[in-house]
Image (tube, helix red, strand yellow):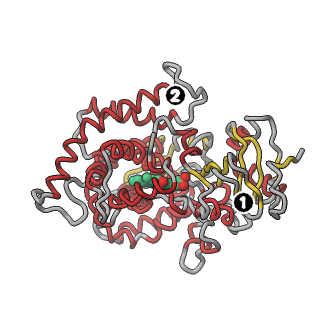
Amino acid sequence: MTSVLAPPPQGSGLKPVPGVPGVPYIGSTLAVMRDPIGMARKRYDQYGPVAWGWLLGQRTCTVQGPEAAEVVLVNRDKAFANGPAWSYFIGPFFTRGIMLLDFEEHLHHRRIMQQAFTRPRLRAYMDAMAPGIVKGIEAWEPGPDFKVYDHIKRLTLDLAVDVFMGVELDDAERARVNGAFIDAVRAGTAYVRFPVPGLRWHRGLQARKVLEEFFYRHLPAKRRDAGALRGGTTPHAPRGASGGSDLFAALCEAETDDGQRFTDEDVVNHMIFALMAAHDTTTITLTTMAYYLAKYPEWQERLREESLALGKPQPAYDDLDSFTGIDMVMKESLRMLPPVPALPRKVVKDTSILGFHIPAGTLVVVPMLSNHHMPQWWPDPDTFDPGRFTPERREDKIHKYAWAPFGGGAHKCIGLYFAGMQVKTILHQVLQRYRWSVPARYEWPLDTTSLPSPKDGLPVRLDRLEP
Ligand code: HEM
């Protein structure tokens, strides 16, 4: 039976949010996890763009379509907060990560962090990453059952250690840090959300301690390098990318024009968060691209030709712009399966979305995955069609928030150019060395209970190309 979330204030002219709450706390959580797009379409047909129900243990208002997404993400009257929304899922493991900060404090951190993502920095990260990419991909063993997801995950994690941390690790230490990092990420999806030894939540808390200890141990050396640079004792530093070409060094050095810098504690919190923000998202993007390129071999060939046409094995940063096919496939893959499928916000003061009254305390969810599949905004939305992003078609131009895999507003992904650079560089290297395929009728079984991933690891037939 339909019920309203809360009566709007008298005389406000606002409408109440309709919905079917379902069983308190549980509501439609399982159904949404099983079939997020189907459930969103059903809800939209029944109630329109703004509807409520119990989801993930909270009264949740799901707001569909780019117009509602814009209201929430642009957040003009500062009614939507990130911290209390995201903390529920990842708070204890990613304490004071930038995405969990809000308003003035967030802006202060964001201005400093921006210094670690300038173009000179990105060039330096790309150079630092290149040897690791080639080495990792060269080591792949072709065969009929090559698990793409597992190999990409391994590769991006190894790259993260090199490019993010910039610290030489022996095998044991690398395994310890990688393991801690994986446990911290996994803990966010724990069913038992308090520390029982051996279970996910507990392992996540232990992992956080390992990561903190690791970064605090290496921090003084990074600070020293940064200090040496500012004192002018580090020669040959490219402008804006110096002391070290890793993110850790960049965060230690980052300074705004008016002299604002991160404390040691900030650097550690942001490093742990950035590792998480970068790793799974890039892995999912590359795996999705590999999936569609296996299903649409004509696109795989087109991209390979484009890569070979570059005429050099290692692209420079500016060469990435010439990969127009890779760019379209990346955009379409991010549309089909945005790695962050929904963006939660907590309403901190009474507000309205598209004329609906939203009371303080409500959890609002912007469902990016189902937004990308709305027939109201996208022609033939469930079909993989990179051509929608050609200059002639640009179907995403229909609305600024129609295609928003990186979010928008103050919290828009700070690593989006980094992600593009990493994804394109890796794919370019893979295309030059391998061809891959899946059986004609293969459909990947997706796990959508957390960040999406293929349950079977995406097995493909991988063949090495003749030199
Ligand atoms: C294809 C890959 C990626 C996708 C799809 C992605 C997606 C997102 C999204 C949707 C948000 C906004 C979350 C919200 O508004 O609640 C976000 C924020 C963020 N991302 Fe990414 N991301 C990707 C790669 C990266 C990489 C490579 C890095 C770092 C190198 C990174 C660092 C961050 C950070 C630090 C934030 C928080 C920004 C803030 O709150 O101001 N991301 N990302």
**Left or right: 130 as drawn, with respect to 345:** left
Q: Nearer the viewer, residue 264 or 152?
A: 264
* Depicted 390 relative to depicted 187: above or below: below
Which residue is rendered at x = 28% and y = 54% of the image? 250
| Image disc number at residue 188 | none
| Residue 179 appears in the figure | yes
**Left or right: 391 as drawn, with respect to 417:** right
First-in-chain label (2 vs 1): 2
The furthest residue to the right: 1
Disc 1 on helix, strand or loop?
A: strand
Horizontal and vertical percent position of residue 464: 37, 51
According to the picture, the residue beneath numbered tag 1 turns out to be 352
* Separation of marks 2 and 1 at Cα, in angstroms: 35 Å
**Left or right: 77 as drawn, with respect to 226:** right
Query: Which part of the image, by quadrant, shows the N terminus?
Result: top right
Give residue 207's quadrant in the image.
top left
**Left or right: 362 as drawn, with respect to 428:** right
| Residue 291 appears in the figure | no
Does the beta carbon at disc 2 come under 8 Å from ligand 1? no
- Total marks shown come to 2
Which residue is rendered at x = 45% and y = 29% of the image? 205
According to the picture, the residue beneath numbered tag 2 turns out to be 201
Amino acid found under the numbered disc labelled 2: Trp
The furthest residue to the bottom: 392
Horizontal and vertical percent position of residue 398: 64, 74
Horizontal and vertical percent position of residue 184: 45, 35
The furthest residue to the top: 197
Amino acid found under the numbered disc labelled 1: Ser
Does the beta carbon at disc 1 come under 8 Å from ligand 1? no
* Depicted 65 relative to depicted 98: above or below: below
